Amino acid sequence: MKHTLSVLVEDEAGVLSRIAGLFARRGFNIESLAVGPAEQPGISRITMVVPGDDRVIEQLTKQLYKLINVLKVQDITEIPCVERELMLLKVNASSSNRAEIVELSQIFRARVVDVAEDSLTLEVVGDPGKMVAIVQVLQKFGLREIARTGKIALTRESGVNTELLKSLEAKV
């Protein structure tokens, strides 16, 4: 199972390197990693997606807390969250299929950010499922390049689990 960890750290040189080293020494992979300033000056939030069962994640959490600059570690996998990713996608686009690509991109609320004679570059923002879906839809045109950020996430103060709501709507 994939777990999403939210880690608050002191914003100092070498913190990310120590965290990556901890994972590497224990043979764990980080599937997605995003780092940026948090709400307080001098604090950064690291959001990472890590494969492993509950026992492995519990062990990693304990190991992370042993690192000097780590302030808080939270497994937010089962907590209602707002999750987003950013993806830039360069797709082959001839004059004959350009309109279809633009129409499909609008369905996903993607923005065209660059137009060339034989390609379009799209910007897509959304949950990880949306990223997979648009890639599948545009695959038939030929994908030249893809660049994706790691997942970022914040817990929902409302406590509303939108994934649960989506599944309930699907059953109706």
Image (cartoon, grey):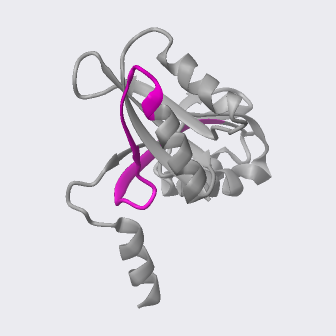
Residue interval drawn in magenta: 65-89
Q: Quadrant of residue 171?
A: bottom left
The image shows residue 73, relative to residue 55, as above or below, that is above
Along the viewing direction, whichever of 39 and 113 lies nearer the viewer:
39
* Residue 84 belongs to the span the image colors magenta: yes
Residue found at the very far top of the displayed protein: 13
Q: Quadrant of residue 89?
A: top right
Along the viewing direction, whichever of 51 and 125 lies nearer the viewer:
51
Residue found at the very far bottom of the displayed protein: 172
Q: Residue at x 43, y 33 (%)?
A: 65
Q: Residue at x 21, y 54 (%)?
A: 157
Percent across and percent down for residue 7 are 41, 35
Whether residue 111 is visible to the viewer of this picture, yes or no, is no
Q: Residue at x 59, y 45 (%)?
A: 50
Percent across and percent down for residue 126 are 46, 49
* 140 on left or right of 86: right
Q: Main secondary structure of the magenta part?
A: strand
The image shows residue 114, relative to residue 82, as above or below, that is above
Q: Quadrant of the N terminus?
A: bottom right
Percent across and percent down for residue 166 are 41, 74
Q: Quadrant of residue 119?
A: top right
Percent across and percent down for residue 150 are 54, 37
Along the viewing direction, whichever of 148 and 151 lies nearer the viewer:
151
* Residue 32 belongs to the span the image colors magenta: no
The image shows residue 142, relative to residue 118, as above or below, that is below
